[in-house]
Structure formats: structure tokens, C-alpha cells
């Protein structure tokens, strides 16, 4: 075991040491998360699978997230429409509003907002549930019952979230655009049929597909953060609370970071 | 200090110079201990002396920092993954808090290994779970309840039923009577003895409860500061002549054992 005694460091170098230690800790954590993710993905992609667990997660992550994702999408679309209408008006281009709403929702806001909602709802729930299982030795119990916790707990959650988030984003895209349509037709005097036609004619396959690819990546991040922080929690109830907070915050930050990277890649396509 | 190891046969379990530390806290400092097949060993000792860590290493739940954990004479750490899984699959454990899966019913908990690891059809697994519940004096109606609907004693019984349902060769009992009233504790001790004798398996129990130690153990070993300081037949615990054991048995504050506070 390494000694806990640290060599004496001149006081002027203390900040350097502190920064160095933080960087090393960060890299170590990143390595642990990466290994956890790779192991989880490997278990998700290879048998044996636990179908019952997967079905339960599909229900919990997907079906029960529909209301929160739908409501977020409808209000986002409804708020986006008048803003773009106002912005477009400055260039005498108000009529382009349906197309920009559709583009904004499918490429960016649909996947990002749905993922953020799932970070709050699903990532937190996963961290809390798995953390509580850790605190009450249920994860150890799984091992003594010849069941790999990665296959039983982690893989179904990763797989379910990666499958479900793109499906939720399709729903969010439709509801978000519908939210814009309602505002446009009821308050901005747009013709409903023309709005739909303009949107449909304008959107390209890739606008939707790129959003769905983002959603799958975000889904992996949401589940990974929830599972990682829950699985590695310690310190009883306080540790579970800490794991839940870390899961939501880290998932949200990583979603934005991944969004930027994916957008950069997609726009250079 | 410690009594000689069982002779004449390969021990079912053997800790050989096992060391384990958490940061700067050295928990096990060269643990040497063995259990013969079919025997019941109880490990006693104060809080924080490494009893739980010792059985978690034996059950494959955590690795040792150094030393060897032998199962049937083979080092767990040196076994290929499949062989290691096979060696560990012959073990069951009753956890201190029960560790029942709260999202599953009682019968699903008991049949968990049968359904998920042994791939026994659910109907057959339920039948065997109900049989296992009957062995710990719980009726079939309990099978459809959830763990949160059970008392602490019933949860321990369900945990015991789960541990014995797959007929393991080795069972670990982690503080089986902690938090239970004396009558329930006695009932749990009797059930443990009955199940261990009935299955003919090897048992390792860790406990603070001396009555439990006397009842369920063929032998008792005392762990202090990460090493075994005494080992002998359960009947000798009250006349061990060992200052550590005497202090523990009589619950004296003065003696070689430092209180954990």
C-alpha cells in the first residue's frame, strides 16, 4: 500500500501540486468511467441477456418518460415559434419560421431536451436504485447468487436507454413541431396546411437521423452516469444522495459536451 | 495462540497469509485459517476486526491485497474465470441485513439463482422456492409477499431459504442474529444448525453473539487486529485460557482488546 505521507513541498508550489492532483484524479475517474462503460456495453451486446430486466427498463425509461418529454417538447416548440417569427421579421423572412422550428427541434432541441429530461428522471433514479442496492448489499447478494451484476443491472439499463431515447426523440420532434404549429396557426395567422407542407418539404432525412444518432449517444451517457455513480456509491444514505446528484450533473454536462462534438462532426459531413 | 489446522483432508476453505487494507487502515494482517469439509466454523471478534472482510474475500466479493484464498486447495485468484465462477457457484450467503431484492416477491428472491443462473423454468423454480421456505418454517402464502412486508426475523428466514435453495457446498452467515430478539435469535440459530447439518455443507459464521457461536459452531476462532488469536472447539470457549477470548466472553472493558470507540 502506498504511504499516506506526502513529501514536503515548498509553499509556493502547493497550488501546482493541488492542480496536478486534481488533473490526475480527473483522469483516473475518466478511465474508470470508460472501463465501466466498455464493460457495460460488452455485457449489453453479448448473451446471456436478462429479458425481463430489459423489458422493465424499457417500460420505466421509455413509457413513463413520455409525459415529461412530450410536455417539454410541446412548450419548447410553442416558445420557439414566436421567437423565430420575431427574428425572421427583422429580415422580412417571417414565412421561414416553420422550417427553422422544424430544423431546431429535430437537429438540436428535441434530442438535447429529451436527454436532459431523462438525465433528471432516469439517471437520478438509476443512481438511487443501484446505490441503495449497493448500500444494502444487494449487489453482493447478486454475486453470491451466481449472477453478474453488470449483466443483470447495468446492461439492461444501458441497452434500454439507448433504444428508447431515439424513440422518445421521434415523439418529441412530432410534438415539438406541433407546438410550433399551434402557436403559428392560432396567434400568428399561419395557414395550418401550408405550415405542415413547408415543414415536410423542407426537412431532409439527415435532419431527423442526426438527431436520432445524438439521442442514442445521449441515452448511453444518461444510463452510464446513473449506473456508474450508483454502482460506485459508498457511505449509506448520504452516499446514495451524493451519487444521485453526481449522476444528474455529470450526465447533463456530458450531454452538452457530446452535443457540441457530434454537431461539429455532423456539420463537417 | 491458534489451535492446529484440521488434518487428514484438504480444507474446504483456507485463508493463507491473507492481507487486506482500506487506505491506511490495515484490516487483515496475514490471516491464516482453514475449515474442513462439512464443518461449521464461527469467527468471533470485536467490531472492525476484519470478520466481514474475511468472509467477503472467501466468497469472492472482494480481492485480497496479498496472500491466498484457497477453495478445495485451489487459489481463487489463480483460477481461470470459468473455474472461479464454478468454485464460487457452490457458495451461498446469508447477509447481515438480509439483502433481499425489494423489487421481487419472496419466492422470486428465494428462486433467484434457480431462475437467473441455473435457468430452471419459473414454475419448477417456484415449487422449489416454496419447499425451501417450508424448510425455514415459512408457509407458501409468504412467497407472494414483498420483503418490505416481512419482519426482521422473517427476512432472515427468507435470506436463509435463499442461501440454501440451491444446495450449496459452503454457506457464509454474516451476523445472522444481529438485531433480532432472543427468541427469534434462538429460532434462527436452530434453523441454521438444522440446514447446515441437513445439507452436510461447510459453514462459516461471523457473529458477536456468543450463544449463536456456541449453537451453530463446531469450532470457534477469534479474530483480533487482523489475525487469529485463538481457535478451538466451541465447547472450549468458556475455558480457553486465552486473554482475548476471556475478555470477549465476559465483555470486560479492560484487557488486550481495545474497544472500537
Image: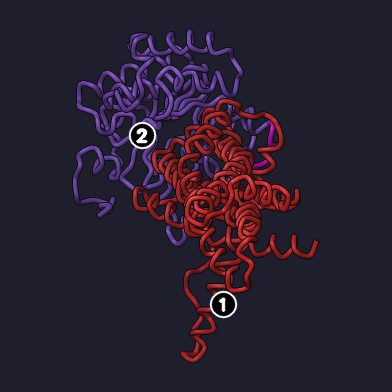
Disc 2: which residue: B96
Query: What is the display colour for chain A?
Result: red
Q: Quadrant of residue B145?
A: top left
Residue at the image point whose x is 53% and y is 50% from the top: A185
The residue drawn where x is 24% and y is 22% is B184
x and y, in percent, of residue B51 in the image? 40, 41
Check disc 1 and report the residue beneath it. Answer: A20
Chain displayed in purple: B
What is the distance, in whole Å, between disc 2 and disc 1 at their CAs?
41 Å
Foreground residue among A150 and B24: A150
Report the magenta stretch's main SS: helix
> As displayed, is residue B65 above or below residue A146?
below
Judging depth in this view, the residue of B133 and B149 nearest the camera is B149
Q: In percent of the image, x 26 and y 41: which residue is there? A: B248
Q: Chain of mark 1?
A: A
Residue A11 colored in magenta in the image: no
In the rendered image, residue B69, in percent from the top left (x then y), is placed at 57, 39
- Answer left or right for B12 relative to A138: right
Kindly give the residue lying farthest to the right in the view shown: A269
Which residue range is magenta in the image?
B77-82
Q: Quadrant of the N terminus of chain A?
A: bottom right
Query: Is residue B79 highlighted in magenta?
Result: yes
Amino acid at each position: 500500500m502506498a504511504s499516506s505521507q506526502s513529501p514536503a513541498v515548498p509553499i509556493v508550489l502547493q497550488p501546482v501540486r493541488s492542480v496536478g492532483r486534481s488533473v490526475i484524479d480527473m483522469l483516473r475517474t475518466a478511465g474508470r468511467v470508460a472501463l465501466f462503460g466498455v464493460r457495460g456495453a460488452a455485457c449489453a451486446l453479448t448473451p446471456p441477456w436478462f429479458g425481463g430486466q430489459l423489458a422493465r427498463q424499457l417500460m420505466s425509461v421509455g413509457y413513463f418518460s413520455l409525459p415529461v418529454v412530450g410536455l417539454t417538447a410541446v412548450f419548447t416548440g410553442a416558445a420557439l415559434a414566436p421567437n423565430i417569427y420575431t427574428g425572421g421579421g427583422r429580415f422580412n423572412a417571417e414565412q421561414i419560421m416553420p422550417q427553422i422550428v422544424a430544423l431546431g427541434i429535430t437537429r438540436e432541441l428535441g434530442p438535447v431536451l429529451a436527454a436532459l429530461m431523462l438525465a433528471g428522471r432516469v439517471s437520478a433514479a438509476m443512481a438511487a436504485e443501484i446505490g441503495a442496492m449497493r448500500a444494502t448489499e444487494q449487489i453482493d447478494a447478486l454475486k453470491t447468487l451466481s449472477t453478474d451484476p453488470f449483466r443483470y443491472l447495468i446492461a439492461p439499463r444501458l441497452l434500454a436507454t439507448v433504444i428508447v431515447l431515439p424513440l422518445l426523440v421521434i415523439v418529441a420532434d412530432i410534438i415539438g413541431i406541433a407546438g410550433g404549429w399551434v402557436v403559428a396557426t392560432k396567434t400568428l395567422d399561419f395557414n395550418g396546411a401550408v405550415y405542415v407542407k413547408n415543414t415536410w418539404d423542407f426537412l431532409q432525412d439527415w435532419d431527423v437521423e442526426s438527431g436520432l444518432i445524438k439521442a442514442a449517444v445521449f441515452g448511453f451517457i444518461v444510463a452510464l452516469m446513473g449506473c456508474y455513480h450508483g454502482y460506485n456509491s459508498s457511505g449509506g444514505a448520504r452516499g446514495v444522495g451524493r451519487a444521485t446528484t453526481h449522476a444528474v450533473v455529470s450526465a447533463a454536462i456530458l450531454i452538452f459536451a457530446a452535443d457540441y462534438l457530434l454537431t461539429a462532426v455532423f456539420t463537417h459531413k | 495462540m491458534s489451535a492446529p489446522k484440521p488434518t487428514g483432508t484438504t480444507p474446504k476453505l483456507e485463508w493463507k497469509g491473507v492481507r487486506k487494507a482500506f487506505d491506511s487502515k490495515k484490516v487483515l494482517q496475514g490471516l491464516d485459517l482453514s475449515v474442513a469439509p462439512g464443518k461449521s466454523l464461527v469467527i468471533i471478534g470485536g467490531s472492525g476486526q476484519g470478520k466481514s472482510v474475511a468472509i467477503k474475500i472467501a466468497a469472492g466479493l472482494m480481492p485480497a491485497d496479498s496472500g491466498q484464498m484457497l477453495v478445495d486447495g485451489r487459489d481463487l485468484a489463480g483460477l481461470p474465470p470459468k473455474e472461479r465462477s464454478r468454485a464460487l457457484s457452490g457458495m451461498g450467503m446469508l447477509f447481515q441485513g438480509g439483502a433481499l431484492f425489494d423489487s421481487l416477491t419472496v419466492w422470486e428472491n428465494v428462486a433467484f439463482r434457480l431462475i437467473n443462473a441455473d435457468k430452471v423454468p419459473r414454475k419448477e423454480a417456484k415449487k422449489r422456492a416454496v419447499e425451501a421456505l417450508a424448510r425455514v418454517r415459512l408457509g407458501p402464502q409468504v412467497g407472494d409477499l414483498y420483503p418490505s412486508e416481512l419482519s426482521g426475523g422473517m427476512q432472515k428466514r427468507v435470506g436463509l431459504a435463499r442461501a440454501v435453495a440451491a444446495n450449496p457446498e459452503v454457506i457464509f452467515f454474516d451476523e445472522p442474529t444481529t438485531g433480532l430478539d432472543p427468541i427469534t435469535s434462538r429460532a434462527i440459530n436452530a434453523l441454521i444448525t438444522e440446514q447446515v447439518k441437513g445439507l452436510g455443507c461447510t459453514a462459516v459464521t461471523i457473529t458477536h453473539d456468543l450463544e449463536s457461536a456456541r449453537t451453530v459452531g463446531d469450532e470457534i476462532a477469534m479474530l483480533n487486529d487482523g489475525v487469529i488469536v485463538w481457535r478451538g472447539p466451541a465447547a472450549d470457549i468458556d475455558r480457553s485460557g486465552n486473554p482475548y477470548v476471556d475478555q470477549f466472553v465476559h465483555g470486560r472493558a479492560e484487557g488486550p482488546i481495545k474497544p472500537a470507540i
